[in-house]
Image (tube, rainbow, N blue to C red):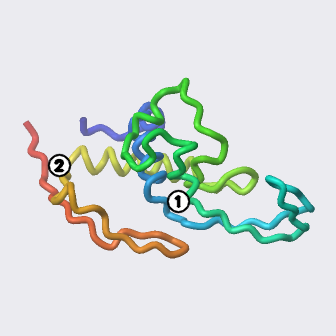
Amino acid sequence: MNREITYEDLNKLNYCGAIIKEVSRLMPTVSVLFRVSAKPDEIAGYKFLANTQFFINVPAIQMHPSHWNQPEKFDPDRFMDSEQQIPKNALLHFGGGARVCMGKQLAILQLKALMVLLYRKYDVELMDMSGGIKYSSTVVNHCEELPVKIKVKHSA
């Protein structure tokens, strides 16, 4: 397929969307979300004053076994079952609530387009499936090394 990709095409790529969610769940771009309470509140018996600063540990939430079956396993299919309810705020790859990233939908469309354009022309293969991913984890996480083999696909 060499035609241009349309918006409608990208919206049909449900499995690509599931892969994006699962990669983001296992390796979130941001490790910590910062929030400030607007008013006094009580959570699980703990009282918090207005203007209390909260640091939300994104990887801990996205890997918690109370939210996910086999949380350490890469399984995009967990996002394909429309009947399976993902607990509220268990997936925070674009933040959540009133402060969710404005560019979320655009970013997902761009990632899907990148996947289509890449895999349309190239075969991409991990060099070492057992080696794990080398990454740095600070406020923003990034991959340091991921050896892959890329081969041009030849037209038939």
Q: Position of residue 68 (x, y in %)?
A: 51, 42
Which of pointers 2 and 1 lies earlier in the amino acid sequence? 1
Horizontally, is 33 left or right of 40 in the view? left
User: Mark 1 belongs to which amino acid?
Assistant: Pro
Nearer the viewer's eye, disc 2 or disc 1?
A: 1
Which residue in the structure is indicated by mark 1? Answer: 59
| Vertical order, 10 against 50 (above or below) | above
Q: Position of residue 151 (x, y in %)?
A: 12, 54
- Structural crowding at the residue carrying mark 2, measured as other residues with C-alpha within 10 Å and reported as few (<14), some (14–19) or many (≥20): few
Label 1's element?
A: helix
Horizontally, is 138 left or right of 117 in the view? right
Q: Position of residue 63 (x, y in %)?
A: 50, 52
| Vertical order, 30 against 18 (above or below) | below
On the rendered image, what quadrant is the C terminus found in?
top left
Label 2's element?
A: strand
Q: Which picture quadrant has residue 78?
A: top left
Q: Position of residue 50 (x, y in %)?
A: 90, 67
User: Mark 2 belongs to which amino acid?
Assistant: Asp
Q: Nearer the viewer, residue 51 or 65?
A: 65
Instruction: Identify the residue at image location x=19%, y=50%.
Output: 122
Seen as rendered, the residue at the extreme top is 83
Q: Nearer the viewer, residue 120 or 108?
A: 108
Q: CA distance from mark 2 to mark 1?
A: 30 Å
Instruction: Identify the residue at image location x=16%, y=59%.
Output: 127
Q: Which mark is residue 12?
A: none
Which residue in the structure is indicated by mark 2? Answer: 123
On the rendered image, what quadrant is the N terminus found in?
top left
